[in-house]
Amino acid sequence: MIITLIARVAQLLIGAVVLALSVVLINGYGPGHAPSLLDYGAFCGGAGLLIAAAGLGAIFLEPLQGIIILALDGIASFFLLAGAGAFVAEVKTGNCADPYYILAIWKVIRVSDMKDYNGDRKKAEDDIIGRCRMAQADTAFIWILFILFIVTIGLTFMSRSSKRGGALV
């Protein structure tokens, strides 16, 4: 139970980070609508938060334990794997100070035309590099959230097969 509790709290925290990073990237995007990748990142973070909260409740409420929470964890894992794969395909890996890498991922990190840097080129470059790093961090945190949900699936199976009651799980 303690390990599951730690994993669920970590899911809540990482889910909040994924949601926040995606929302910040969506908010500063422009012109036009942000790519669906960022919307899907926000969905992954929000769904991760909700399912982690349900899992946290399942630790203390007997009716939620078992197949219900196992199904929710499986659904979350599926959507997170899809999101992580999509982010890796679009954001890839690279150095955010490299202009060629920035051009390669520009459709994901594009900065709003409404932002005014008062002619300060350094501020504009720092903003672009910051958005690049946020996209990379979002990718990493979605993978971490996926792994945490796989861990809770494993813990659920371990607690169901344990004859001693699963005190640690």
Image (cartoon, rainbow, N blue to C red):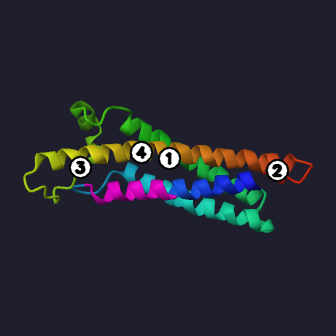
Contact? badges 4 and 3 (CB < 8 Å):
no
The answer to whether one can see residue 28 in this image is yes
- Circle 3: residue type: Asp
Residue under pointer 4? 137
Q: How far apart in space, not on screen, are marks 4 and 3 (Cα)?
A: 15 Å
Q: Quadrant of residue 97?
A: top left
Which of labels 1 and 4 is toward the front? Answer: 4
First in sequence, mark 3 or 1: give its number: 3
The answer to whether one can see residue 108 in this image is no
Q: Residue at the location (78% across, 57% down)?
A: 66
Give 94 or 47, whichever is nearer the viewer: 94
Question: Element at badge 4?
Answer: helix
Q: How far apart in space, not on screen, are marks 1 and 4 (Cα)?
A: 9 Å
**Left or right: 2 with respect to 31?**
right
Contact? badges 3 and 1 (CB < 8 Å):
no
Question: Element at badge 2?
Answer: helix
Question: Element at badge 3?
Answer: helix
Residue under pointer 1? 142
Q: How far apart in space, not on screen, are marks 3 and 2 (Cα)?
A: 47 Å
Q: Residue at the location (86% across, 46% down)?
A: 161
Q: Residue at the location (21% across, 55% down)?
A: 112
Inspect the magenta stretch and tell me whether residue 22 lies in it.
yes
Q: Residue at the location (26% across, 43% down)?
A: 129
Crowdedness of circle 2 by 10 Å Cα count: few (<14), some, many (20+)?
Answer: some
The magenta-colored residue range is 16-29
Give 142 or 76, whichever is nearer the viewer: 142
Residue under pointer 3? 127
- Circle 4: residue type: Ala
